[in-house]
Image (cartoon, coloured by chain):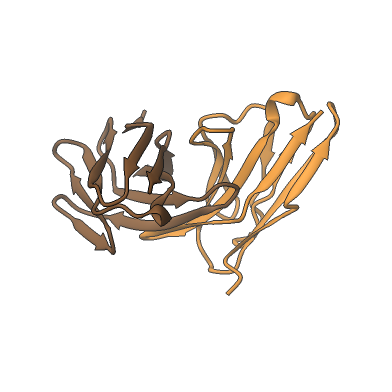
Amino acid sequence: NAGVTQTPKFRILKIGQSMTLQCTQDMNHNYMYWYRQDPGMGLKLIYYSVGAGITDKGEVPNGYNVSRSTTEDFPLRLELAAPSQTSVYFCASSWSTEAFFGQGTRLTVV
Amino acid sequence: ELKVEQNPLFLSMQEGKNYTIYCNYSTTSDRLYWYRQDPGKSLESLFVLLSNGAVKQEGRLMASLDTKARLSTLHITAAVHDLSATYFCAAEYGNKLVFGAGTILRVKS
C-alpha cells in the first residue's frame, strides 16, 4: 500500500512564484488535511476536507488554496509565495480512528 | 476553539529512568493521538485513545486518557537511547486534528 503520497519532496521557490503541492491517498479516506511545520514547532492546520467537494479553513489558511475534486487527491496551492511560507508541509488522511501522514514537502521561498 | 498544550517542551533524561509527558486540551475531544517524529521524518502513529480511562502500552511507552480532566499522559519506562525523538499529542474535535507543540526527548547514555 502506498498510503499518503506527497510530491515534490523538496522545492525552492522565488518570492511571488506559485506552485501546487500534490497529495494523494489510496486508502479511500474521506478526511484529508494539510499542515505546516516550522522548525522546532508543532503542526498547524492549513486546510482540511471531509470529502470530495468539501473543504474548510484551518488555523493558518492565508496565502493558500485547496480543492478536493476526488476522494484520493487534495492539492495545496500557493499563489504568491512569500518567505513566511518557508516550512515543511505535511498532508494527512484519516478514517475513524487513525490519521496517516505523508513524508512531507520541504519548501523554501527565497 | 480547541487548544492543546504539552509539557515539558524539552526533556533530557538518563537511560533507565522513568518520566511522563503531559498533554492538556481545552475542550471536549473525540479522540486523542500520540505521534513520534524523528528528525527530518514524517509522523509515526503511536497510540489512539478513544474513551475515558483508556490505557494503551507498546514496549516502554504507555499512554492514558482522562477525559474529565482533559488530560492525556505518555509515560516512558526505563528509557533507552532509541526513544530519542519528538513526541506530539493531537486532539480531534469535529473534523479537525489539533496538535500540541511537541516534546523533544533526549535520552542520554
| Chain in brown in the render | B
Say whether residue B93 is visible.
no
- The residue lying furthest to the front in this view is B109
Say whether residue B31 is visible.
yes
Q: Position of residue A106 (x, y in %)?
A: 69, 43
Left or right relative to A81: residue A57: left
What residue is drawn where x is 30% and y is 52%? Answer: B79
Chain A image colour: orange
Which of the image's four quarters has the N terminus of chain A? bottom right
Left or right relative to B79: residue A74: right
Q: Position of residue A36 (x, y in %)?
A: 59, 38
A81 and A71: which one is in front?
A81
What residue is drawn where x is 31% and y is 48%? Answer: B32
In which quarter of the view is residue B50 placed?
A: bottom left
The number of numbered discs placed on residues in the rendered structure image is: 0
In which quarter of the view is residue B66 placed?
A: top left
B75 and B4: which one is in front?
B75
Left or right relative to B90: residue A73: right
What residue is drawn where x is 28% and y is 64%? Answer: B59
Left or right relative to A85: residue B82: left
Q: Position of residue B75 (x, y in %)?
A: 24, 48
Which of the image's four quarters has the C terminus of chain A? top right
Q: Position of residue B26 (x, y in %)?
A: 28, 30
A47 and A37: which one is in front?
A37
Q: In the rendered view, would you say B46 is above or below A11?
A: below
In which quarter of the view is residue A57 placed?
A: top right
